[in-house]
Amino acid sequence: MHILEIIEKKRDKEKLSKEEIEFIIRGYTNGTIPDYQMSALIMAIYLNGMDDEETTNMTIAMANSGEILDLKEIDKTIVDKHSTGGVGDKVSLILLPLVASLGVPVAKMSGRGLGFTGGTVDKLESIPGYNTEISTEKFIDSVKKIGISMISQSMDLAPADKKIYALRDSISCVESIPLIASSIMSKKIASGAEKIVIDVTVGNGAFMKNVTDAEKLAKTMINIGKLANRETICILTNMEEPLGYAVGNNLEVKEAVKFLKGEEIPKDLKDVVFELGAYMIKLAGLGNDLEKNKEKLQENILNKKGYKKLLEMVKNQEGDITYLEDLEKIPKAKFVGKVISDKEGFIEKIPAKEVGKIACYLGAGRERKEDKIDNSVGVVLKKKIGSKVKKDECIVEIFANDENKLKEAVEKMKEIITVTDLQKSLKKPIKIS
Ligand code: URA
């Protein structure tokens, strides 16, 4: 077998065999296939696609490129959760302690943010002391002992995906259905869960810009799940505007804590948390009635069991819970700027991707892997799409530690937000299984 023949085949729109796909993944992971040849192949896949069989073979080969976590020791049905990525996406911080407080065991490996999207691990690490890099033994023990652990994805898990994802990112080949599906499902299979709930984001701030493509991605992942014996449910959710109000690491932690305490619950965030949560409870075998499951989630916000579970997890992973108990202790950025509406009307657009880029520019995210994160910077929306706004009212607050960056961010934000005379509303989550 030769890599050039495989590249030629895909370039000429032919189907790759299981053996060819295994050869590529093995060769690229161990370094015998160089970046330039893999780039050519990835671009050919991006342009010419792969069918379901090729995508499944690629997924399995990527999952098998490293360690496959064995969660059998936990002795309960593990339901994993994943999101295809977005802006202001703090769903895991809220949803996972909440379902864990209802008895759904949570063994979650999350990623860091790259580009304009945030990552759960960076948000968790903005809690002083929180350790996302505990050993696999402590990870499993924590799930057995307190029902939840959230850590950073182990280096040994699907290493082929790590290399291929970084390559795709550097050659503008991220937005491809077979490549996204194999990337996500290889990690889910390697992280050991039997059942998987995936939040497939759609819109300006997501990889899938329209519902047709998002449905295709969802169906591809569900199909891979079937072939790999992992029950998979996908929920399509809106990512036209940032989710909730806050974008930026410790700003999102604050929003998550207020949500779990029942103090401030943004409607769009609640729709996503409750929809995914209802299915996680169902897949865990703890209740088939989705509406009743949502009531249970509501109850554990009111009685603060979800919030207490978050504290328990943070404490178990060496985090300082006094920062969560007293949100005033969380470090604040030095400068705050406001974006003021110059007319009355309804908010038409707050494009998630551009908001994510502004937060990233302020230091909330990384342009490159080695960049350091600034935990206290970001933006907090005061209005959402469809909200009424008066002239001179504040639409967004921007938090920065650099005055010049703040000025630029305020100007940029003014350019991207639009106000109109007609009110627009956003769609609710759609389930595909
Ligand atoms: N998330 C992933 O894990 N992989 C992708 O390719 C896109 C989103």
Image (spheres, helix red, strand yellow):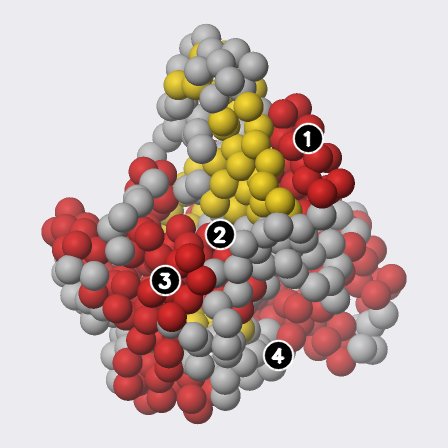
Amino acid at pointer 4: Met
Q: Which residue is mark 3?
A: 326
Q: Residues within 10 Å of mark 1 (few under 14, many from 20)?
A: some
- Indicate if the residue with disc 4 has its beta carbon within 8 Å of ligand 1: no
Disc on res. 155: 4
Q: Is residue 352 above or below residue 20?
A: above
CA distance separating discs 3 and 4: 34 Å
In the rendered view, would you say 196 is above or below 427?
below
Dot label at residue 394:
none
The residues tagged by marks 1 and 2 sit, at their Cα atoms, a distance apart of 20 Å
Seen in the image, is 23 located left or right of residue 297? right
Q: Nearer the viewer, mark 1 or mark 4?
A: 1
120 relative to 412 in the view: left or right: left
Query: Earlier along the polypeptide chain: callout 1 or callout 4?
Result: 4
Does residue 117 lie above or below 67 as drawn?
above
Dividing the picture into quarters, in which one does residue 280 lie? bottom left
**Considering only order in the chain, which callout, 3 or 1, is on the residue closer to the N terminus?**
3
In the rendered structure, which disc, 3 or 4, sits on the residue that comes first in sequence?
Answer: 4
Percent position of residue 269, x then y: 36, 44
Q: Find disc 2 in the rendering and name its residue.
A: 251
Disc 2 to disc 3, C-alpha distance: 14 Å
Say what amino acid the circle numbered 3 marks: Asp
